[in-house]
Amino acid sequence: MTVDLRHATGALPTASRPVVMGVLNVTPDSFSDGGLALTDDGTPDRALAVGRALVAAGADCIDVGGESTRPGAEPVPVDEELARVVPVVAGLAADGIVVSVDTRHAAVARAALAAGASLVNDVGGLAPDAGMLDAVASAGAGYVLMHLRGEPRTMQDDPRFDDVVAEVEGELLAARAAATDAGIDPAAIALDPGIGFGKTLPHNLALLAAVPRLAALGSPLLVGTSRKSFLGHLTGVDEPAQRLAGSLASAVLAVRDGARIVRVHDVAATVEALAVVGAIDGAGGGPRHGGA
Ligand code: PMM
């Protein structure tokens, strides 16, 4: 099965190669790149330049987020999230770039879709905001459904699972059923285990080891490991922007195991790494996984 998150408003590639989603956080406080794309005068110019540079580096789509989801982050008022996100979405979409909006809020999703976004990346997808599923369904947009129990502010307060893979899988499937019941096209849904979202290091590793299983659930699997703190725990690299080696290793393995979309900060390096993986897989007659 090819990656099909296309809808009336835009298209992600349906090629057999994985989709690289570039991260563009228009927030002052994201753990990985906080403040980089914000300008003091509140114009979207710097964010637009960063987004365009990510596309030039090979990103297939840009994921624009206006609320930090780092552990302990305080929620952002919806008005502020709208003011951060909508001008950036509109500017990138006007350039013909496929834009995803990273939000938990239906009002932000709705405004971003109206401004030209093609996908909603719902990090609150297990318990969607009222009106979120309808906003996505009525726009005919793509929907990334990420696993997160609770909310970012408290998600790292003692997360517990008896069997993390089975529980994440079951909760994603239930949420996908709710999304399709609400009218979202099953072919427009991607699933995401939510690496680092309410999970301990062993939970994250178990989920990454289970990518072949999660990729076989009938929806393209998105994996986001880029610069995350579990990589810092494993490598001793404290500074998120320095976690490139761990980010690449985990992205390459996820793709080899069947993930179809990787959400990354370091687009150029990821595209290079995946080109090598693709060439090796091609020489061997294709990848080893049987993912969606
Ligand atoms: N991670 C972050 C934010 N949004 N969305 C999806 N679907 N999957 C993720 O893993 C994910 C996400 C946190 O990373 P950032 O603060 O660097 O954007």
Image (cartoon, rainbow, N blue to C red):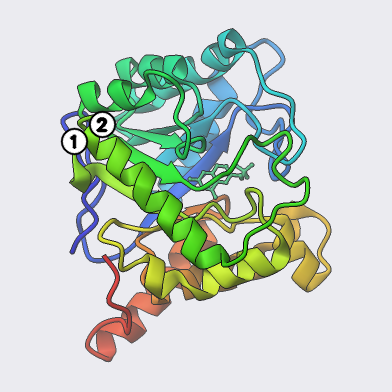
**Residue drawn at (58%, 25%), measured in percent from left and top?**
66
The correct choice, above or below, for 284 with respect to 39 in the image is below
Left or right of 291, for residue 259: right
Q: Is residue 140 visible?
A: yes
Q: Classify the position of the C terminus by image quarter.
A: bottom left
Q: In which quarter of the image is ligand 1?
A: top right
Residue underneath mark 2: 141
Q: In which quarter of the image is residue 5?
A: top left
Residue 7: image tag: 1
The correct choice, above or below, for 248 with respect to 161 in the image is below
| Separation of residues labelled 2 and 1 (CA atoms) | 6 Å
Nearest to the observer: residue 4 or residue 49: 4
Left or right of 124, for residue 39: right
Image coordinates for residue 259, horizontal then vertical, percent: 39, 65
Left or right of 73, for residue 77: left
Nearest to the observer: residue 79 or residue 22: 79
Left or right of 151, for residue 273: left
Image coordinates for residue 49, horizontal then vertical, percent: 52, 31
**Residue drawn at (39%, 27%), measured in percent from left and top?**
92
Nearest to the observer: residue 213 or residue 13: 213
